[in-house]
Amino acid sequence: MSGSLAAQLEAALARQGTKARAGDQKAYLKSALVHLGVTVPKLRATVAMLDRAQPPMTHDDLVATARALWSRGIYELRAAAVELLLRRSSLLGPRDVPLIERLIRDAHTWALVDVLAPAIIGPLVVAHPALGRTLDRWANDPEFWVRRAALLALLGPLRGGGGDFDRFGRYADAMLEDKEFFIRKAIGWVLREVSKRRPAVVHAWLLPRAHRASGLTLREATKYLPSEQRAEILARARGHRSGPASGGQSSASSSSSASSSSRRRAARR
């Protein structure tokens, strides 16, 4: 069935795309993949329609179909693979984490990673807490998409007012001075979502670290904080950044680099 469903999805999606949208989409995502130019709503509707028309799907059917779609090197087929995994996520378990990790490593775009991490890996970690060790490893990975996935895998429960903020805090602390845009954005995104229900938690965590956070992280993280808390954090950040530009700057930079390495090691624990 895997080959049949994958072929059906490819044929159906190929009919729905436009060259103009494909070009715009490819440029927007800075993608090296082939793009068909299918809108997200159309893609999701097509996957849902063809999935419902299939006979009962087994775990092996699901994995084989996802692999077949992914291997084609076409963005919409990779997105369809992710959508199918999400629709059939009840079939997935810890044994499938290596597959999901391979997809994350090969995705090279937030448009795929940002579904795989919070919507597929996240629930698996909740259901199987031992997978936290996998996230610990991801948080120290050289590939920034994998590090982003470690952060976003914790997003769902945190957004709902629960979750493992201590684990997120360790990861975020170790990555706070990361220069990668998508890491800075992810930290701010998670903090922003937490702040909607638990502003005091975000304020207490971010205030002593405000001088280390990027402007992007600060803007995202403080967006929904009460005005007094937001002002205090931003003032703390400005106060450090407007300090003396000479003298101890070089040694401070070295110290920051060393402490960043220590924090990265600490995130492994």
Image (cartoon, rainbow, N blue to C red):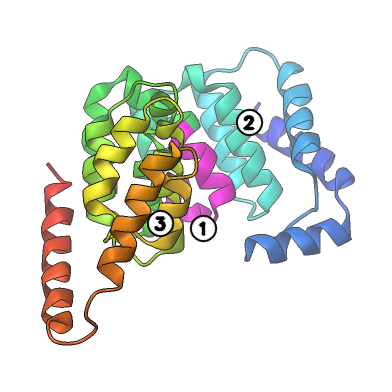
Q: Position of residue 51 (x, y in %)?
A: 71, 22
Most foreground residue, 82 or 167: 167
| Discs 1/3, front | 3
The residues bearing labels 3 and 2 have C-alpha atoms spaced at a distance of 38 Å
C-alpha distance separating marks 2 and 1: 25 Å
Q: Inspect this view and state whether residue 102 appears.
A: no
Of 155 and 201, which appears nearest the observer?
Answer: 201
Residue occupying the far front of the picture: 228
Residue drawn at (40%, 53%) of the image: 218
Q: Which residue is mark 3?
A: 184
Q: Which residue is mark 1?
A: 108
User: Label 3 neighbourhood size at 10 Å, few (<14), some (14-19), many (20+)?
Assistant: many
> Which residue occupies 72% across, 31% down?
4
Report the mark closest to the observer, 2 or 1. Answer: 1
Task: Give the quadrant of the C terminus.
Answer: top left
Q: Tell me the kind of residue under disc 3.
A: Arg
Q: Magenta region: which residues?
A: 102-118
Secondary structure type for disc 1: loop
Question: Does residue 42 appear left or right of residue 226 in this picture?
Answer: right
Q: Position of residue 248 (x, y in %)?
A: 12, 81
Q: Nearer the viewer, mark 3 or mark 2?
A: 3
The image shows residue 14, relative to residue 130, as above or below, that is: below
Q: Amino acid at mark 1?
A: His
Q: Please state which of residues 134 and 203 is positioned toward the viewer in this rendering.
A: 203
